[in-house]
Image (spheres, rainbow, N blue to C red):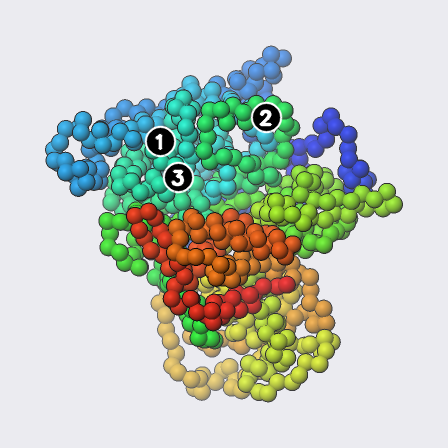
Amino acid sequence: MVQEKNDGINKDMVLPPIQQNRPALSWELKIMKKLTSAPPCLGKFRPAVGQCCHQCTPDSLRKKLGQNSSLGFHNLLSVKETQTRYRGWLVRRVCCALFVSGCKVYASPVSNRLERVCQSNRVREVLTAEHEAPEGGDGRGQLSHLSSFLPLLKTCISPGLLRLVGWVMLKMFASVFGSIQVNLNHLSALHRVSQEGSPLVYVYVRQSIVDCALIPLVLFCHSLRVPYTVCPLQVYSSSLRSILQKVGVVLLPSSALTEQEAETDSLYSPVMTSLVRELLHEGQAISVGVSVESGRGGQWLAHIRQLIKEGSVPDVSLVPVGISYDCLPKTNMQVGLSTVLQWLWSLLWRRPGGSVRIHLAQPFSLKEMCESGRCRVDEWLPLQDLLLPVILNGRTDCVFGQRRMSWLLPSSHYASEPEEPAHPERDLSIAIILHLIFSATSCMAVMSTSLVSSLLLYKRRKGVSASVLCRDVAWLTEELLFRNKDVGFGGSLADVVHYSLSLLAPHLIIAAVPSRTDPFIVPRPSLAATLHLALQAQTVTRTFILEAVGACAVSAMLCEVAVSGVSSRVRSDGVDGEEVRGDMEFDVVLCQSELTERALQLCHLLPPGSMPPCQSSQSFALDAVDSLVRCGILIMEEIPRDVPICDFWKKEGALTWTTTDDPYHSDSDCEEQDLHSYKISQPSQCPDMLFFLCSMLAGHLRALCWTTTGLDLIDTPLLEAEFVAQIHSHLCDTANKKKQHYESCSEEAAHTAVRTLIDLGVLSEERQKRGVFLGVSPLFQLSENRQKLHRFISQYLYN
């Protein structure tokens, strides 16, 4: 933890003003009046985030590379004359242009890159196999086959145009955002690595097209090498494509609308791999975004991993980037020149809203991660092997292992390799993708709108007064900082709450009754409002994922006890239970092994990036249960033993020995583990914290339940895109009928639910020429099995 010297936050981190030449609303006046005496306590402690993984890359972690944990933050949009070499009245008027002209730019000419790509072995092999061209054929024939990729191969970085585009982006983002805060703690490490000659690869989680522009702008303003940015954008205007390609933006081919469509071309993968090889040989940096729900973008990391394995590239340094928004900007995936001009024109009539926080994590070696063997994938199993015995056969013991998520890497990348379910190189590439997704999301700061959204959606859904909300904000901020999570806000409590409510006002109902001095705040019961709050609250959910998994496991056991009417301690010991006669006598005892089993089963249903990929599921489940003890929800009690712990001769079985280099090895592995039981800390009334944590995963679990029940309403087989669209429609219809739970019907929830059912074996995939068709597998065409699946998932749902 880092303690700031000032009374709140750094000077550049002050929240942007909300009221600009407009009268204050009645609820704003009442909130400010109610909270004028709040002390400026927030933002005083800042955790150091973005460290390397201590297990997978310990050598990179030890380097530090001049890291300074007290540099603070820099507002990218606050350009002053002190950042230029000149002073004076005129300089203050044109200081942005002078600053841009003084930034260091690394030119990147194309030179003979096109010839080197055409002469690469992987491109020549594909051309020889498909077009029956002789191996020593002329270059003109090869260029004719590669005509659609020639603009991509000619992507370069023009210093003059880059400075102009940088100036335009600074002016443009000043109209969109109030501030863009950059964490300076790891910039010195990036400078040092770039000077050592190791190419940098920046990896972020895709949220918006704005991500593609923010990272190059940050690096440009801090005189770092601007990366070649992989942008999954289809631009129709030829002039706009030409400008973007001259500032290092690698677009999709003009013939493809989406990444998935581009990958159907057999030449796309070898050409892009060769392009990446040439860029890394030139010492260029690359910026790649990865999609959590679809895995798109991970193929670029697989290209780099393949080049290191071949020895074509010695090594690269991976840099996870966490980008957090107060309000996520809406962008269109298909852009034309007219739409860009209309959007720029609209910026002239709008005020900046919200801020952005960017964390550039500590770089680490990809070669170290791959060749050290510390990134383990030997326990990966299909999801149906992990959960189907529990769902269909009612097994009480789990199958230990990690869930294999093969869909994170398109199969076309390994089309030339044998179709094996557990290909080691493929699994290692997927492990790297998972690790980077988790690292990038862990770097994301919790913004004030995210914090308030999670409180309103999961804790105070029926409404809350402003004073109570402020107490909740102070409490949750302390909990976040205690978990080493950075927050993207600071200042007095009144400013933070007022600022976040002003940004979330379109999605809230704020009642300022004249007879009350304390306004009442309720989330709007609509689809758009709930989805916006749920999207903002995702960062908080990822922070409390351990506690949320443990809370859902406790809720599942409590529901089972309530239905059966017996004590869990008596049931697990195999003795006839005593009836639970009333709420005051509901003194349930939860067995540690059973509670851990429930948490372990729930771990396999989590979306990718939720849990550390370098940690075993068993360890994660144990940590989930222990986290509830630390929260005060559970109280640990030891179960008395029939045999003294020191009597080793009466132990069943022999001692088992493990190797000392096993990362999951513990000194106590050869001893019998202590048996514990847990009791709820407040038996008469379950704590609100338990329900708050259960609600965080309710949207994801409810979407799985609704998707399972909706299989009866869909005629299969269908194309995957059509199937997901129908499931999304079914989720929206179900939420509209119930008039609640709208957070379960987003497009991301539908996509994640369908992918989970595919991994479970509920849906079968059939690959045809037109695409992948989905249909219900024969095993789950029986309504009895679908009901078992529905009961298994719904046990974790808290209603």
Looking at this view, is 121 or 104 the one in front? Answer: 121
The image shows residue 535, relative to residue 651, as above or below, that is above
Disc 2 to disc 1: CB gap under 8 Å: no
The image shows residue 236, relative to residue 783, as above or below, that is above
In the rendered image, which residue does mark 1 sit on?
254
Question: SS of the residue at dot 2?
Answer: helix
Disc 2 to disc 3: CB gap under 8 Å: no
In the rendered image, which residue does mark 3 sit on?
258
Structural distance between the alpha carbons of marks 2 and 1: 28 Å
Which of the two discs, 2 and 3, labels the residue nearer the N terminus?
A: 3
Q: Position of residue 432 (x, y in %)?
A: 38, 50
Q: Residue furthest right?
A: 515
Question: SS of the residue at dot 3?
Answer: loop
Q: Position of residue 655 (x, y in %)?
A: 39, 78
Examine the image and state in which quarter residue 197 appears: top left
Structural distance between the alpha carbons of marks 2 and 3: 28 Å
- Given this view, does label 2 or label 3 mark the residue nearer the observer? 3
Q: Position of residue 223 (x, y in %)?
A: 46, 27
| Residue 65 appears anywhere in the view | no
The numbered dot on residue 347 is 2
Structural distance between the alpha carbons of marks 1 and 3: 10 Å
Residue type for callout 3: Thr
* Residue for point 41% across, 37% down: 232
Residue type for callout 2: Leu
* Residue for point 61% across, 85% down: 577
Q: Answer with left or right where residue 86 lies relative to residue 426.
A: right
- Count of marks overlaid on the render: 3
Number of other residues with Cα within 10 Å of mark 3, as a class: few under 14, some 14 to 19, many 20 or more? some
